[in-house]
Amino acid sequence: MLCLLLASRHTPIKILDLPNERSLHKTPTPHTGGIGIISAIFIAWAVYALIYAMPDVMGWIAVSALLVAGISFIDDYRELSPLIRLSVHALSAVVLLAGGLVMFDGWIGTLLTWFTIVWMLNLYNFMDGMDGFAGGMTLSGFGFLAAAGWMQGASEYTISTLLVAAAALGFLCVNFPPARIFMGDVGSATLGLLAAAFSLWGIQSGLFSLWYPLIVFSPFVVDATVTLIRRLLNRERIWEAHRSHYYQRLVQLGWSHKKTVLAEYVIMLLTGGSALVVLQINSVVATVAILVGWSCIYLIIAILVHRLELDVIE
């Protein structure tokens, strides 16, 4: 409810998202919803901290998230150069590293963690191009992170992630197709940072291994990563706006925003649900099976989308 109120299109800050080469919408739409999402999350965390003591790691996460939210707000209001944005993103990743959130020991682990944080932050932003998509991924992704925490009895982790999921649910009330407001970079970039941060916290706390958040957030990770690699191989200018993501290609094939996002929701629930089951089984064989299985499924989806495009051309 708090997020819904703060994300209202009647906010005094008027920033419009104008249609461009990347976007799928055709009319100018307010994109200040992220202010409501992030504000609701921080207010909820603050209230929780007043009642129960929060772990030190939450302070590092909060500072890192505020850095991203701040530069993203400025970018939404007055477009900044990619170098300035990336510099702040890199700094926010360093803050998390300073807080002890690393995947592996040693300098290689630190470097890989830094790269993962920056990439997750940006891919979340790249994937926020369809009504209800990023909000749905946040609801599903943080919901399954919370479920893993609950299974392990990690109350602080569970509550912290549930509050993020709750904020996303409130935002979806105004962002589900047809969207009345977008989250903008303030929302998408900061949520990407939080997805990386809470995944690392869960890994470090022994709640799960790297494969778990990778599968849970795979609807975003796979599409964004495969698209980036494909554009690099085609020698495209990856910093320029485009409509090459698989979800964008489906919309261009004639699928409605609602049909496409609902199909993505099904994938989100299946990836998260299967990951949670395998987490309970706690078997190396099951872990390998889910990684191979979803890799094959995503490959099949990519082939089907390509064939649909060929049919349209013919």
Image (cartoon, rainbow, N blue to C red):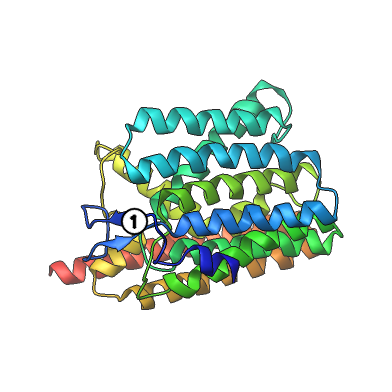
Could you say which is closer to the camera, residue 273 or residue 312?
A: 273
User: Compared with residue 33, is residue 239 higher up or lower down, i.e. above or below?
Assistant: above
Residue at 80%, 45% (x, y): give it: 205
The answer to which quarter of the image holds residue 8 is bottom left
Where does label 1 land, which residue? Answer: 14
Residue 115 relative to residue 177: left or right: right
Q: Quadrant of the C terminus?
A: bottom left
Task: Kindly tell me whether residue 295 is visible in this rendering.
Answer: no
In the rendered image, residue 27, in percent from the top left (x then y), is placed at: 22, 66
Could you say which is closer to the camera, residue 301 or residue 196?
A: 196
In the rendered image, residue 90, in percent from the top left (x then y), is placed at: 51, 29
User: Compared with residue 88, is residue 148 higher up or lower down, i.e. above or below?
Assistant: below
Q: Quadrant of the N terminus?
A: bottom right
In the rendered image, residue 215, in percent from the top left (x then y), is placed at: 60, 57
Residue at 57%, 54% (x, y): give it: 39
Farthest-out residue, left? 314
The answer to which quarter of the image holds residue 164 is bottom right
Could you say which is closer to the camera, residue 314 or residue 50?
A: 50
